[in-house]
Amino acid sequence: MVFSGILSIHTDLRYGIVKNRISLCFFIYALIVNILYYVCFASNFFINWIANLGILTLVAILLYGGKIWGAGDAKLFILMFLFVPGRLLDGFSLSYGILPYIYVFLVAVGWLIIDTVKHFKKYPMQREPFSFSLTELISIGKTIIETSAFGLVISILLPNLPEQHSLFFSFLIIFYSYYISSKTWSQKFFVVLSHLIVIIFFVTRNHISFSSTSFVFIPAVIIVTFLVRFSSLYNYKEIPTSSVESGMILSSATTLLFQTSSVRHLPTNYSEDMSARLTEEEANAVRRWEHSVKGKPSVIIVRKIPFAVFIPLGFLLFIIIRIVR
């Protein structure tokens, strides 16, 4: 785990990607070691381990599909779990497939806060008023109502899930919250009203209290929204156009500048997520664009969160805590 983590961190920091051949070599090694381990020494832990591997893999794919991280990060995360011994997973619980994410994102959030504060101090002229508009506050309220309804329905259909697999249940709630927060249809009045009716119906007819549905995620939604809003004020970085490399993500404002350019193969994706990462051909085109009539000496890029650094650190923290515990 340590060796593969170091190599992955090195390639991500130097080339902006986790190379497939490195992941493949360690996948094969981990597969052989796990076959020997579970056949010869820990067969009674295999079912719990493989079930949580399935949950962890599904979440990694969902995060990739949601453009939160790249394919290399998803593969690295799955690879790290292959090095986790089944003996560290006490008792059957699907929450072990979620725990590593908590540690990884704790490290990532810590870095995000520190990096944002450093950027805040370094570029005081870029400071903007930090506030939420009434529309944003209403949107957060709608998201909480819809997520509450979803959590209530899940707890009715699967009554043992919140208690026996609390972390997995919490993940479903938070992922649903993230999913609907980016959908315009979720903000429509009739959609919010239908979710509110669901809450009122189940609470009154089934005598279910709010405390029994694990609504601890509500402050989590607010805190995450606060952190994302705060960090988004310093989410960009200006670099020389000649320094643009593959794997970088250009700001939407920068990409708009290319619309009237005659330079071929310039990027056209304005989304600012992982799908907008530059290919080698696009990076070359941007560097050529600098010397064109409408070119500029600098461009704005989206500051990348180095998940490949946080994933090995998060898993190392996970294993240390499981051993000490």
Image: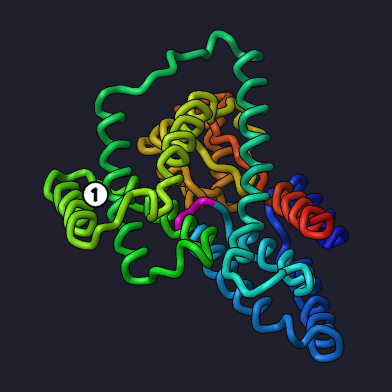
What's the residue at 19%, 47% (across, down)?
192
What's the residue at 69%, 62% (across, down)?
76
In the displayed structure, does residue 24 sit left or right of residue 201?
right
Vertically, is 214 above or below 237? below
| Residue farthest left in this picture | 190
Viewer-nearest residue: 172 or 234? 172
Vertically, is 228 above or below 106? above
Q: What is the count of numbered marks?
A: 1
The spot of residue 297 in percent (x, y) is 58, 24
The spot of residue 51 in percent (x, y) is 60, 77
What's the residue at 73%, 62% (across, down)?
19
In the displayed structure, does residue 130 sit left or right of residue 82?
left
Vertically, is 322 above or below 84? above
Find the magenta span and give its range.
64-68
In the displayed structure, does residue 202 sit left or right of residue 41?
left
Which quarter of the rendering shows the C terminus?
Answer: bottom right
Residue wearing tag 1: 186
